[in-house]
Amino acid sequence: MHILKIVLEIIVVIASILLTLLILMHKGKGGGLSDMFGGGLTQNAGTSGVAEKNLNRWTIFIALVWAAIIIALGLMTKFNLV
């Protein structure tokens, strides 16, 4: 069980980095702090296409994997399985 915990922790670290990068790759929707600094000027420059939909799917998938592993690690710790 100790090896399983280490593997899950490594996967959580990798998923965290991927999730951060995927979130940063999303196009801004405007109306936030980015508009204060000129980010709203290019708001209508692009449209949401296949790449944006795939990016959304990957982000949701990685977020679900990340959450499931966090819950699994928490349950393992709670029930002293490690």
Image: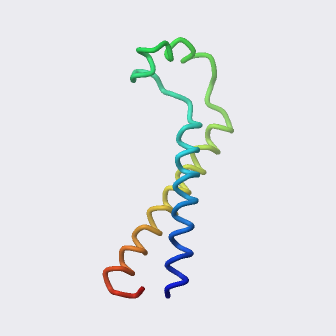
Please give left or right for residue 12 compared with residue 49 in the image: left
Figure quadrant of the C terminus: bottom left
What residue is at 31 percent from the left and 80 percent from the top? 78
Q: Quadrant of residue 21?
A: top right
Count the labels in the image.
Answer: 0
Q: Residue at x 56, y 52 (%)?
A: 17
Q: How is the image coloured?
A: rainbow
Q: Is residue 75 above or below residue 59?
A: below
Residue 74, image quadrant = bottom left
Q: Residue furthest right?
A: 50
In the image, farthest residue toward the left = 78
User: x, y (%) of residue 13?
Assistant: 53, 61
Please say if 2 is above or below 9.
Answer: below
- Residue 81, position in %: x, y? 40, 88
Residue 50, x across and y down, in percent: 68, 38
Write the residue at 36% across / 78% down.
Answer: 75
Tell me residue 7's x, y (percent). 56, 75
Q: Is residue 81 above or below residue 69?
A: below
Q: Nearer the viewer, residue 29 or 48?
A: 29
